[in-house]
Each structure stands twice: as structure tokens, then as C-alpha cells.
Amino acid sequence: MAGEMILELKNIKKVFGSVTALSGVHLQIKKGQVHTLLGENGAGKSTLMKIISGVHQPDEGEIIWKGEQIKVANPKDAQMKGISIIYQELSLCANLSVADNIFANREPMKGMFIDDNELNVAAKKLLEQIELDITPTTLVKELSISQKQMVEIAKALSFQSEVIIMDEPTSALSSRETEVLFRIIDKLKANGTAIIYISHRMDELMRISDEITVMRDGTYIGTVKKEETDINRLIRMMVGRELKDIYPKRDYEVSGETLLEVAGYTKKGLYENINLQLKKGEIVGIFGLMGAGRSDVAKAIFGISPPESGTMAIKGVPAYIARPQDAISRKIAFITESRREQGLVVSDTVKRNITMISIDKLMGKLGLIRDKKETEIAQEAVRALNVKTSSIDQTVNHLSGGNQQKIVLAKWLETQPEILILDEPTRGIDIGSKNEIYRLMRKLAKEGVGIIMISSELSEVLFMSDRMLIMRDKKIVAELDPASTTQDEVMLYATGGK
């Protein structure tokens, strides 16, 4: 019955060495409801979810499942009890098919062999349920990031769990795919399934949540019903400041000097007749729905996907960027939307990730890296960007999403760019880390760097841009002044209603 308690956590405590990750945390999950868990990176959300899913054991406290105190011994035990989790970082095997990934270690058998026909039929039903138009035999390595995320969702649905934990499930999804996910969630709720939902997108959680629990620094702050709260109250609970304080205001004038001018950039199927200008110290925001061509324009400017026709000028001088090395030599930097797959070597250290592009200036006379200089550069970058790490020798995969993003920024800032392209600069990071990145953007712009920012978060583009370009169907369809436009007007252009 909807509203009936299915899972309860009482006074959960978890200690790792000398660090208390969780202390006195409570959570009450009810059937047929979406319970959102909100908090900055480091608030303890992931640790709590790992306790629920059997990855960690609590040092103190109780887990109550359907009215009885239990122990969740391991992830398999959690699945057997009816608890599934969709992690933010994808855990698919790239060289296996979609069907193999969905039913890994649970494949239907025919005697001693896997029944491929039954496997693919079952996978196809799940793919149809989530409206994902791919074949079950497609290899995962051939999928886009958003398609991979949808496969993770299909995998969780295959367990037919009573509680599904979704950790930032829409961070890589298009607007259409997000709507599909929300419809799936509505169906799950109607069937009595409980959803624990983790997201940094405030408009999203205000739309789908029934109850919201806020955590801070590993402690329980409070639980509120969605209809009895608003975004400002939630942000105050989470970080102690108002939404309007998250976006720093511009306190400088934009120079009249044009850094970059692109005219008529066209590449069939990717972008068409792109015209844009970027001035010194200006932040130009590009907004559009997934598939509009935003990232392809960024890749064109950076030389990853150069145009078939069109021209470029940098500081008034004609330029042709045929490859990323050409862009870097002309002081252009590009922060990709996929930091873990394309922006970082997550198995390497903070130090090496920061210095990998600017390695030439670290070389000594004998062609060896000067360790002392490399350490100085890394330490200064960590200090300047307020990266939370135990050491510059810590591996990057142990950092939070916000700190990983700062490492990507630090790496490119070492090239001293004059033009900075940011593709989804705050995807999947918490409010506090977003604020730090916004402040860094303002600082760089004030110093004269021209910034092109691509974002799926409309509020981000409206508050941070000096000018907005709206894309639809691979074209720029409007240029708007953020100070005098509205979200409704932007969406009309983005969807073709205007």
C-alpha cells in the first residue's frame, strides 16, 4: 500500500579510520513514493546509499526492512531483499552487448549454454519500456553517454526491486530521456515501488519528490514534504545561503575587443551556418535541447570536428583549426562534458592530471621532468581552486565530482587560455562546488578570458551569461539578452514554438 513504511534507518553511524562519515542519520522510505536525498558532495549521501545497498556495514544504528531489523550483508544480499542501485558513475562492460550487461550473471540458460534468444527478447522488452531505440545486441562501447545511462536504468528495472536508489540518474540524459525516466518513475510509484532519488538539480527534485531529506557534513538536517517547502529553504538547509547568492554578479565591464569570430561554420549532420562572436571578458551561453548541436559547435571550434565550410578569425586574424593542437597553440581550451571519460586519467594522481597538457614547460635540459617544478604547479593549482584532496599524489578517482571538475579546469588553466570553452561545467556536482566554479568563471572573465559556456541548466545560462545563443536542429535560432528574457521565451525558441 502506498505510504506504508518499507525501509527505515535509525541513528546510522559510519567511521573510516579517524573520519566520521555519518553520525546520527535517519531515513524513512515509504512504498509508492519518491524520497529525495539532498546534500553537497561530502555530505554522506553516497556512504549512506552504500550502507543500504550492502557495500558498507554501519558501525552503529539500525536498518529496518518491512518492520524487522536486518543486516544487509553485501550487494547481492541487497538485491535478493529487493533493493537495487543505479550509480552515477556507469558500471557497464563496454565490450559486451546491451542484453549481456542488463542480465549479467543472471542470463537465461538452455542446458549448459546461455539462451541468447530469450536473453535478447527480455532485454528488448526493457528497452521498449524505457523508450530506448537500440537493439539488445548492440555493444555498449557504441552507445552515447546518455544511452549508457538508460541501459543502467533498464538493468535496475530488470531486478523488479521494491526499493530503487537512483544516484544522479539524469546527469547525462537529454530532456526527452529525462521525461521518459519520470514516466517510468510514475509507473513504479503506481506499482508501490519506493524510489530513493539523489540529484543536484533543484527544479527536478521539486517536480518528482514526495519527501526530501537534507544532509550536511555526514549528519541528518531534516526531512520535509515537497509541497511544504521551496528551493530557497532547501538550499538554506543544505549550505546556509540563498539561491540568489549561488550565482555571483558581474562587477566588471566587458571589453569591446573581439577574441573569436566564427562565420558560416557548417558540417553536414552536425552543425549548420554557425555564426558567433566572443569578446574579451565575455561569457556567451549556448542553450538547446539534447541533439541541438551544442557540443558539436564546441568541438568544431576546438578542432575535434572541423567544418566543411565557413571561416574563423582570432583577434581579427584569419585562422583554421584543423585539430586540437592547433586550438591549444592559439590559446583555446576545451573542458569536455564527460570529465571522467575524456577529461581525466582517473587512475593517475592529482599532480599528473594537472600538469599533463603543460608537460613541456616542466622538462629539464636532459628531457626529464623537473619533479620540484611539477609539484609546485600542482600545489598552487590545488590551492587556487580550493581542491579538496589529501595530497597531490592522491588518485583522482577518489575525489568527489566537484573536485574532479576543478582538476580538469586546473589542467587547462595551466595552458593560460584566452578562450575557454566549458561544456556542461557543473554537471553532477553539488551547489557549493557549482558556486566555486561560477566564481572562477567570473574571475577569469574579469581578467579578460572569453568564455563559451554550454549548459543544459537553463537557470545557469540565464544567471551566468552576458549573451545567450539558442540552438535547435543544428542551428543557432536566436540570440537573447539574459537580463531581459524569460525561461518560457528561451524554451519556445529551443523547442520550435517560436
Image (cartoon, helix red, strand yellow):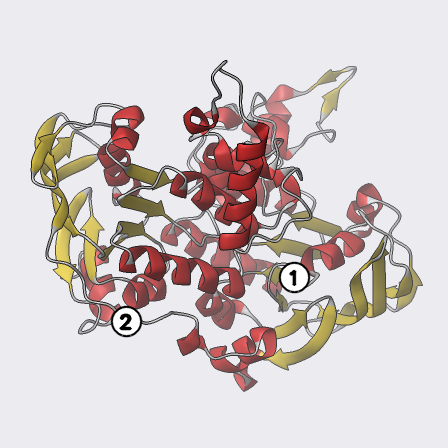
> Foreground residue, 139 or 352?
352
> Foreground residue, 460 or 175?
460
| Horizontal side of residue 74 vs 443, given as left or right | right
Residue 314 at x, y percent in the picture: 14, 38
Which quadrant is home to the C terminus? bottom left
Which quadrant is home to the N terminus? bottom right
> Foreground residue, 359 or 93?
359
Residue shown at 31% from the left, 68% from the top: 463
On screen, 109 above or below 62? above
Residue 414 at x, y percent in the picture: 41, 39
Q: Quadrant of residue 121?
A: top right
Q: Is residue 344 in sight in this rendering?
A: no
Instruction: For mark 2, give the secondary structure.
Output: loop
| Horizontal side of residue 273 vs 109, given as left or right | left
| Horizontal side of residue 109 vs 170, given as left or right | right
- Earlier along the polypeptide chain: callout 1 or callout 2? 1
Amino acid type at mark 1: Ile
Q: Which residue is mark 1?
A: 196
How many marks on residues? 2
Residue 245 at x, y percent in the picture: 42, 76
Instruction: For mark 1, give the secondary structure.
Output: strand
The 10 Å Cα crowd at callout 1, few under 14, some 14 to 19, many 20 or more, is many
Residue shown at 91% from the left, 55% from the top: 71
| Horizontal side of residue 10 vs 108, given as left or right | right
> Foreground residue, 70 or 194?
70
Amino acid type at mark 2: Asp
Q: Which residue is mark 2?
A: 251
